[in-house]
Amino acid sequence: PIRYAIEAVCIAEYDGMEFQDMNSEPTAKNPFRSVFRKARDVTRMGGLALVKRGNEILEELGLANESYQGSLEKLAILSLGFLAISWIGLTFQHGPKVASPKHSHSNSS
């Protein structure tokens, strides 16, 4: 169930998202400046420094063909299945029954 919950969160967060280019200032004076800046950002942000769209992240995660609703449906089916198994297990349990406490009356003299 955790898989489908994480899939749903990723799809909800990244589907259709556009990332803003933080190095969008003009670099007419020095064309290599943006290249060095991007290389520096890669060391700070890892692979996300070069991502432009959220759909690229979903493609890399293998979620390009998945939908938010589909992930939630799978999560609901699993949850209902686990609930049914728990109910069946508790209903037909043949273990020892809990005895009610016996009250002992002491004769005080």
Image: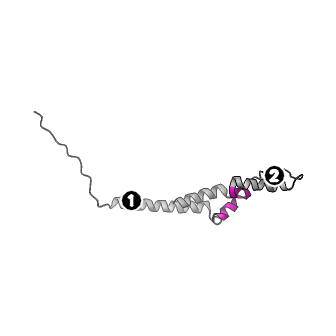
Q: Answer yes or no: do the residues labelled 2 and 1 have beta carbons within 8 Å?
A: no
- The answer to which image quadrant residue 8 occupies is bottom right
* Number of residues whose C-alpha sits closer than 10 Å to that of mark 2, classed few (under 14), some (14–19) or many (20 or more): few
Viewer-side residue, 65 vs 49? 49
Residue 48 covered by magenta stretch:
yes
Q: Look at the numbered disc 1 and give the secondary structure of its residue.
A: helix
Instruction: Label 2: state its secondary structure.
Output: loop
Q: Quarter-wise, where is residue 85 in the image?
A: bottom left
What is the count of numbered marks? 2
Tag 1: amino acid = Trp
The amino acid type, in three-letter code, at marker 2 is Ser
Q: Residue at x 20, y 46 (%)?
A: 102
Q: Which residue is label 2 attached to?
A: 24
Occupied quadrant, residue 65 = bottom right
- For residue 49: magenta? yes
Residue 24 x %, y % = 81, 52
How far is mark 2 from mark 1, CA to CA? 58 Å
Q: Position of residue 94 (x, y in %)?
A: 29, 61
| Residue occupying the point 62% across, 62% down | 67
Residue 103 in sight in this render: yes
Residue 62, horizontal then vertical, whole percent: 63, 66
- In the image, 65: left or right of 100? right
Magenta-colored span: 46-61
